């Protein structure tokens, strides 16, 4: 039996996700952006919340933990390296750990940079990656806590996942990511194609999530920090790839 993913908007521009393991009937919320939005999604599906998996400590990803825990008595799993910043965690995990939800398994991968202890959840069997603020469509999260080198290494490991992987990220930032990406990588055909598709989706008020990882590998400048044309754009040909990644991140910050 399969893992079913429910996608719903929350807060201003967050996405909330429920993952439902059909075999056991267990349902986990990936992050806890907003109590009302999560409860509405549960009601719409007729599922009961059993678990919450947390990616990082920012308020727009943890705010509903305490309420949901009080109401549903759920198991809350989160990043060991941010345990002191998150209220209500029951189980702590880190890179290389595996989380079991009924018959479904999620590999925990460390993606430091947006926050130092940020983790993502990868369900290999279904080909689902829950990337929160580590990897967006055509972008990555702002580097609040980390440094470019380790952030690039984390992102590069996500790039090694299969092309057919569907990525579920934390925010609808794709259209502004596309504008920036086109400004630094204007001749990239895969990027132009994705940017046009994103524009059409947003014009109809539709989400750009989930997105295909294989297409993002070709179009997302942050996944292409080792492409010579991007080093050239910043005039740092031959620089370490982490340094190019840092230049792209800085470029986006001031775009
Ligand atoms: Zn965040
Ligand atoms: Fe966020």
Image (spheres, grey):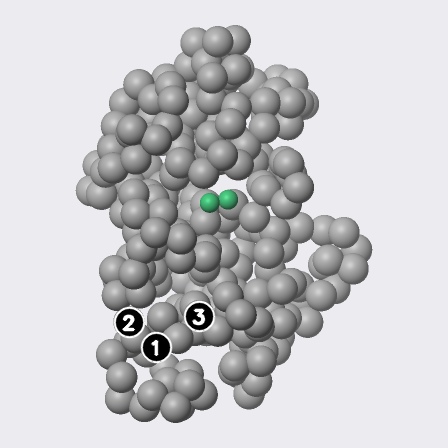
Q: Residue 250 carries which label?
A: 3
Which marked residue is nearer to the observer: mark 2 or mark 3? 3
Residue 211: x and y in percent read 53, 56
**Distance (Cα) linking label 2 and label 1:** 5 Å
Which marked residue is nearer to the observer: mark 1 or mark 3? 3
Give the structural element (helix, strand or loop) at label 3.
helix
* Residue 70 horizontal side relative to residue 99, left or right: right
Asked whether mark 2 lies closer than 8 Å to ligand 1, one says no
Residue 122 visible somewhere in the drawing: no
Mark 2–mark 1 contact, CB under 8 Å?
yes
* Structural crowding at the residue carrying mark 1, measured as other residues with C-alpha within 10 Å and reported as few (<14), some (14–19) or many (≥20): many
Q: In which quarter of the image is the C terminus?
A: bottom right
**Distance (Cα) linking label 1 and label 3:** 10 Å
Question: How many marks are shown on the rendered structure?
Answer: 3
Mark 2–mark 3 contact, CB under 8 Å?
no
Residue, disc 2: 242
Residue at 30 percent across and 35 percent down: it is 82
Residue 95 visible somewhere in the drawing: yes
Residue at 72 percent across and 51 percent down: it is 206
In the picture as drawn, the residue positioned furthest to the left comes out as 96
Mark with earlier residue (2, 3): 2
| Residue 133 drawn above or below residue 152 | above
* Structural crowding at the residue carrying mark 3, measured as other residues with C-alpha within 10 Å and reported as few (<14), some (14–19) or many (≥20): some
Residue 79: x and y in percent read 30, 35
Q: In which quarter of the image is the N terminus?
A: top left
Judging depth in this view, the residue of 62 and 45 nearest the camera is 62
Give the structural element (helix, strand or loop) at label 2.
helix
Residue, disc 1: 244
Residue at 40 percent across and 36 percent down: it is 57
Give the structural element (helix, strand or loop) at label 1.
helix
* Residue 39 horizontal side relative to residue 229, left or right: right
């Amino acid at each position: 039996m399969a893992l079913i993913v429910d996608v719903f908007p929350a807060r201003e521009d967050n996405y909330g996700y429920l993952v439902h393991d059909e075999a056991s009937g267990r349902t986990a919320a990936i992050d806890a952006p907003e109590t009302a939005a999560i409860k509405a999604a549960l009601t719409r599906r007729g599922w009961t919340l059993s678990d919450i998996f947390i990616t990082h400590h920012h308020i727009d990803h943890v705010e509903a933990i305490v309420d949901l825990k009080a109401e549903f008595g759920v198991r809350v799993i989160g990043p060991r390296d941010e345990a002191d910043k998150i209220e209500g965690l029951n189980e702590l995990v880190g890179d290389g750990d595996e989380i079991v939800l009924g018959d479904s398994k999620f590999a925990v991968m460390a993606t430091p940079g947006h926050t130092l202890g940020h983790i993502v959840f990868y369900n290999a069997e279904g080909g689902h990656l829950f990337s929160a603020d580590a990897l967006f469509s055509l972008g990555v999260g702002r580097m609040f806590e980390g440094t470019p080198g380790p952030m690039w290494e984390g992102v590069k490991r996500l790039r090694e996942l299969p092309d057919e992987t569907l990525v579920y990220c934390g925010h609808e930032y794709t259209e502004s990511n596309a504008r920036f990406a086109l400004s630094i990588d204007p001749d990239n055909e895969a990027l132009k194609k994705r940017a046009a598709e994103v524009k059409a989706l947003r014009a109809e008020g539709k989400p750009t999530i989930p997105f295909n990882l294989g297409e993002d590998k070709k179009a997302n400048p942050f996944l292409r920090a080792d492409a010579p044309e991007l080093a050239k754009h910043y005039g740092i040909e031959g620089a370490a790839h982490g340094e190019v990644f840092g230049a792209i991140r800085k470029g986006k910050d001031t775009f």
